[in-house]
Image: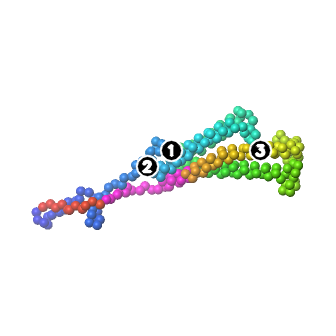
Amino acid sequence: YGSRHRRRLPPPFPRAQTSGRTTMEQPFQPSAPQAIYGIQIADPTLARLTKRVMCLAAAAAVFAVISGIVNLTVNTSGTSGISSSGVRVGFVVVAVGLALLVPACGYFGAKNADSNLACCFCGFNCFGSFCNGCNIVLAVVAYMGVKTLLDNCDYSDRTRSCPASWDWSTACAKIAGHENDSGRQCFAYYEDLADKMKNGLPFVVGLTLPTLVLQCCSFAYGSKFYNHLKNRSATPTVRVLYATHAIPGQPALQVH
């Protein structure tokens, strides 16, 4: 055939000219799924958040059980008003069971990628951290208030800082079991109360502060996990991307 009958054959693969070189398109390979406690998760951000939420939920569950055991073994009848050991055991068991519901929301929410359970885990930890923070502040303020009252309103030596209306003979009139106490007996009751509060304050702070820190961390990572789930569900499907790399150009084939 003559030169005018020559034709070009199509290239064996798609190519594009880039600065005199040919690029071949290949499908973009996504990152391999990560195994998080037996769960295969392709999204690396979701995998990291899932692992942290599940670890925090497990730690909260263990700490809830330990707190229940400590509350059961320590004699708290003077502050809780529960004198029967059987009633106290039932009270602690119910309290621990309710406390385990929050870690369960976090664990199963992370395991099943459930945004509703993740929202419950995040919200309850936010509320719990606020309550525990108030508990610590109130315990410290209550002790300081009783101590200041005893220092300024001593039964035998009142100072100018003591309120003029304060009367030890009527201060215990509304306290169960001390309605008929004299002024000196009421003052002795408050002294004994101050000693109990002073001895119990390290226990309250030591038991509540780790829970507060754990709940704050759970709220922080729980909110990130929840937001990531919501954003992922709202993101439309993206078409497959192709990565290219340059290869030497090939001359066109000619047929004579």
Quadrant where the image shows the N terminus: bottom left
In the displayed structure image, the side of residue 175 where residue 92 appears, left or right = left
Callout 3 amino acid: Asp
Question: What's the mark number on residue 42?
Answer: 2
In the picture as drawn, the residue positioned furthest to the top comes out as: 86
Q: Residue at x 15, y 60 (%)?
A: 255
Quadrant where the image shows the C terminus: bottom left
Residue 152 is one of the magenta-drawn residues = no
Circle 1 is placed at which residue position? 111
User: In the image, which residues are magenta?
Assistant: 222-245
Looking at the picture, how far across and down is residue 197, in whole percent? 75, 45
Question: Disc 3 and disc 1: Cα gap in Å?
Answer: 48 Å
Looking at the picture, how far across and down is residue 77, in whole percent? 74, 38
Q: Residue at x 45, y 51 (%)?
A: 44
Circle 3 is placed at which residue position? 195
Element on which disc 3 rests: helix
Looking at the picture, how far across and down is residue 48, in whole percent? 49, 50
In the displayed structure image, the side of residue 135 where residue 102 appears, left or right = left
Looking at the picture, how far across and down is residue 33, in whole percent? 42, 47
